[in-house]
Structures are given as C-alpha cells and as structure tokens.
Image: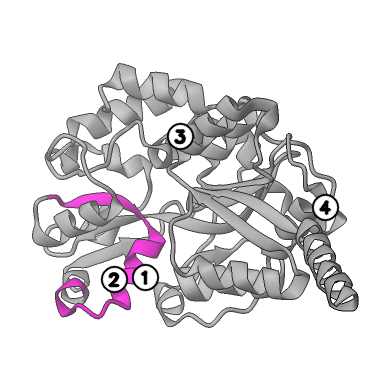
Amino acid sequence: MLRKLIAALAVVFVSQGAFAEEKVLNLYSARHYQTDEALYENFTRQTGIRINRIEGNEQELLERILAEGDNSPADVLITVDAARLAQAEAYGIFAPVQSAVLEARIPAHLRSAHWFAFSTRARVIIYNARRLKAADVPTYESLADPKLKGLLCSRSGAHPYNLSLVASQIAHNGEAATETWARGMVANFARAPKGGDLDQIKSVAVGECGVAVSNSYYLARMMASERVEERNLLKRIGIVWPNQGGYGTHVNVSGGGMVKTSKNRAAAVAFLEYLASDEAQRYFANANNEWPAVPGVTIDNLELDELGRFTADTLPLPMLANNLVAAQKLLDRAGYR
C-alpha cells in the first residue's frame, strides 16, 4: 500500500514538474485569418512551444498592452500595416531584437530595430474597364487628375492603409505636393469615403465608381472564390500596378515584434525567426495570398501568378513611419475623411 502511495505521489510530482516546464508563447495578434492556425501548429510541432493566442483589433491590443503595463503577459505582437507597427513602436511597446537570422532574411527596408515585416501586400489601382483604360490611371498621382472627377471611391482617410500610402507620397513628392494631390482626390470623389477594400472593388465593378485603390490579396481571394458572382465581378475591372516607371508600387505589410515586458524572450525570438523561415513565408503566400518578405522564396499560388510581377516601392518603412502624423494632418486639411 505504501509503495502504491509513493508511486502515485511520484506521478503527481512528475506531472506538476512537466506542467511547470511547459513552454508557452503569449501571442497578441491582430491577424484574423483562420489559415494562420496551421502556421502556429507547425511552430509548436517544431519547437515544442505552445502558442497562447489573444486576438483583437489593432487598437484594442495596443491599449491592452499599455494598460497591463509591466505585468503584461504578451511576448509577441503581430499586426498589419507599417502605420500600426510604427504606432506600437512609438508607444514603447516593442523591445529591440538582435537576431542574425532576421537581419539576414528580412530586407533592411522592411524592418526597424524593433519590428519586422513578414509578408507584403501591394496597393493596386482598380478601374472600371467600361469607363476607363489603364493609361488613364498609371500612377497614384494620376488619381487627382480632374478628368476623374466624380469617379474615385475610397475608404476612410483615417485608415492606416491610406495613411501609409500618403506617408509614402510625402517621402517621394514632399508635403506640399502631396496635399495638393489629396485635395485633387477629394475633388474627384464619387461618394464620401466608406467601407473596406473589398467594397471599393465591388463598387468599381458595378459602376458606382470608376476607380479605387485596394490591397492585392482581396483580388486574389476573389479570383479563387467559390462564388461565381464574385469571379464575374472581376471581369468588369482592370488592374494597374502603379508607378512602374518610377519608385514602384506601394506595399503595406504584416509584421510584428517582441513586447518589451516579455517573460519568454528566447521563445519570442524563436517565433519571429520562424516567421522568416521558408516554410512560414510560403504559407503567407500560398494560404493567404500575401507575398513573402524574404526574397527568393518560391511559392505555389495560381492567383498571385496570374496577378503578375511588379516593381515594388523599396522606401524604408521606418522612414514612412516618420511621416504618419503629417499624413493625417494633411488629409484632415484636405477634407479627406
């Protein structure tokens, strides 16, 4: 009887020890894609580190980490768009990460000292093929051309996607020219800004607008849609890779960094390095129609192949981040709301 009791206690102690030693990464994520589940499962399978994921929208997660202060359990924050990554950095949420792997694999223009981009999405121009031609809208600057009066649709000027694009315009063309451009776009509005990128695509397709800007992965998603009506909408539109004769097409990103209060720093760095691996990079492309941030990674995505190749803007994202406040003020002055 005594031996059985000792054996039972030994099992309890071993189980408690194993539980105490369980490796866990607390991930705060603003990415809401079910396809990412396999990404996290693969990381756990390779490393033995279980991911405890807390999801929310970008602002909610930032405010939560700030409210938690030094007691925040967050190890890694993942979000979308350089504007949001820059906001997190400005709040002092991220810790600097030193990783030879990340520095070697992620191009310098797609990272800062505190965060790294792991996938990219292009901001393409969508036009109604019955009302316009590609030659009418070859650049972002052309969206302010008076000949487009009453034809432009857009999401809110306060949205990070638009803020990032305008911030890049400031970097390329200067603040004064960019404000003139923004005022020209406001004058061309077909309606007040509203909806998301998918709404802009559909509005252009049905003729409510003549032209709009959208993230590329929405187009790829529609191309692969099981809904015939969505695929048919694409037959009514044309796609332009803007500014191919100049600085290239603007891209926004999905990325993340290690939270400065992380209690699991080794696991946090390991996870960030995993996101830069060939396997994870292919997953961003093949499962969610994003381009890898790491150059030279081969992908297998028919929709991205069909969209074709383009020259991307290589403006350093930290430089873009420096213009975000100016971009918002500029858009407010222009009445781009």
> Which callout, 1 or 4, points at the residue further toward the start of the chain?
1
Q: What's drawn in magenta, residue-wise?
A: 209-230
Question: Label 4 vs label 3: CA separation?
Answer: 26 Å
> Which residue does the numbered mark 4 point to in the structure image?
266
Q: Quadrant of residue 96?
A: top right
Q: Where in the figure is residue 262, as x and y percent of width and height?
A: 74, 41
The answer to whether residue 233 is left or right of residue 300 is left
User: Marks 3 and 2: which is nearer the front?
Assistant: 3
Task: Name the residue tied to disc 2.
Answer: 222
The residue tagged 3 is 59
The residue lying at 40 percent from left, 72 percent from top is: 307
Residue 215 drawn above or below residue 161: below
Horizontal and vertical percent position of residue 73? 66, 40
Pick whichever of labels 4 and 2 is earlier in the sequence: 2
Distance from disc 3 to disc 2, alpha carbons, whole Å, reads 28 Å
**Residue plotted at (32% across, 16% down):** 333
Which amino acid, by three-letter code, is at mark 4?
Ala
In the rendered structure, find residue 220 and report the number of the disc placed on it. 1
On whether residue 226 falls in the magenta region, the answer is yes
| SS category of the residue bearing label 2 | helix
Q: Is residue 208 left or right of residue 67?
A: left
Residue 194 location, quadrant: top left
Q: Nearer the viewer, residue 269 or 173?
A: 269
Asked which secondary structure carries label 1, the reply is: helix
| Within-10-Å neighbours for mark 3: few <14, some 14–19, many 20+ | few
How far apart, in angstroms, are the residues tagged by discs 2 and 1?
5 Å
Residue nearest the observer in this picture, 291 or 184:
291
Residue 188 image point, x, y percent = 18, 36
Residue mark closest to the camera, 1 vs 4:
4
